[in-house]
Each structure stands twice: as C-alpha cells, then as structure tokens.
Amino acid sequence: MDLSAFPYLQDNYAPIAEERDFDEEQLRVEGKVPEKLVGAYMRDGANVAFQPNHYVYPLDGDGMVHAVYFKDGHVSYKNRWVETNHLKTERKFNRTIYGSVGKLLEVPQEVIDAGGEPSPIRNTANTNVLYHGGKLLTMW
C-alpha cells in the first residue's frame, strides 16, 4: 500500500497489516505482572485493510481489536480484524470497493450481484469494544 498521501495513516497511525499473537517471551514487560491479575484489556481502532481511495478522518479504517491478556503473572497479546460484511466483501474481491466518510463510492453492480455488501457506507466497527451476553461486540 502507498499511504504517503494520507497524514492519518503515518507513523503511530500506520495500519498493521496482519493478525498476530505474541506470548510473554516476545513482549517487553517492564516490572512484574501481579500473579493475581486475571483478565484482558481490549481496544478497538481504525486500521485500513486495503489501499484507501480517500482518508481524511482518523476513524475511517476497518476495525481491529487489540487485546492484552493477564493470567498467573504472565501476559500475552493478540490482534484481530473485525469481520464486517464490508471487509469480507473487499477480501472476496481482493481490492478496495467502499469509499470513506468523506468520499462515498457507488458499489459496483458486480459486487452486489455476487452477494457482496450493497451499502456504500462502510461499517467500520472500530470505535469501542463491549462484552455483553457472552459475546465481544465492536461498536461503530
């Protein structure tokens, strides 16, 4: 991806290209994790999966959940894409199909005919994470 034209996709805002799992040996932990600390810290954020056609709003990318897990004095990390219908459709076609908040694109008829997401307004699911009813939900 060439992201040089998009200030909100540079440096600390640059997207992460893949899902990863890191155990304690792969992470830098400063200090000591309390033995009795059990749980997870999760955050959701914007992370473009394909080359954007337009990007002027820092929450315009696809959702990615980052999670840090704590148990028995150990820590691990995972990140996962939020599998929205929009992201699934772009993966199916292996290209950018949907526009952004600032520049909507008409969804090609071939995408609609193939059962892809017909709405031109991308569900980014990248604003918040909520655990409810035994499920982890991402908010848009």
Image: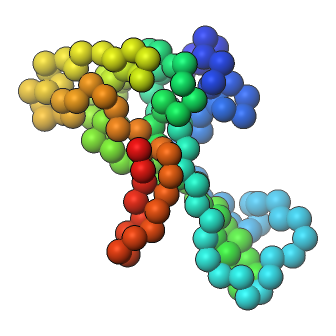
Which quadrant holds residue 140? Answer: top left
- From this view, report whether residue 104 is shown above or below residue 23: above
Q: Residue at x 87, y 76 (%)?
A: 32
Q: Is residue 9 left or right of residue 113?
A: right
Q: Residue furthest right?
A: 31
Q: Position of residue 107 (x, y in %)?
A: 22, 20
Q: Residue furthest top?
A: 5
In this view of the protein, can residue 126 be seen by the observer?
A: yes
Q: Is residue 95 left or right of residue 27?
A: left
Residue 133 vs 77, above or below: the answer is: below
Q: Residue at x 77, y 86 (%)?
A: 35
On screen, 84 above or below 26?
above
Identify the image quadrant of the N terminus: top right
Residue 54: x and y in percent read 47, 15
| Residue 92 showing in the rendered view | no
Please indicate whether residue 101 sits to the left or right of residue 7 in the image: left
Residue in the foreground of this view, choosing between 139 and 50: 139
Q: Residue at x 13, y 18 (%)?
A: 109
Locate residue 99, reporting x and y percent.
Answer: 37, 20
Residue drawn at point x = 68 percent, y = 24 percent? 10
Q: Is residue 90 above or below residue 34?
A: above
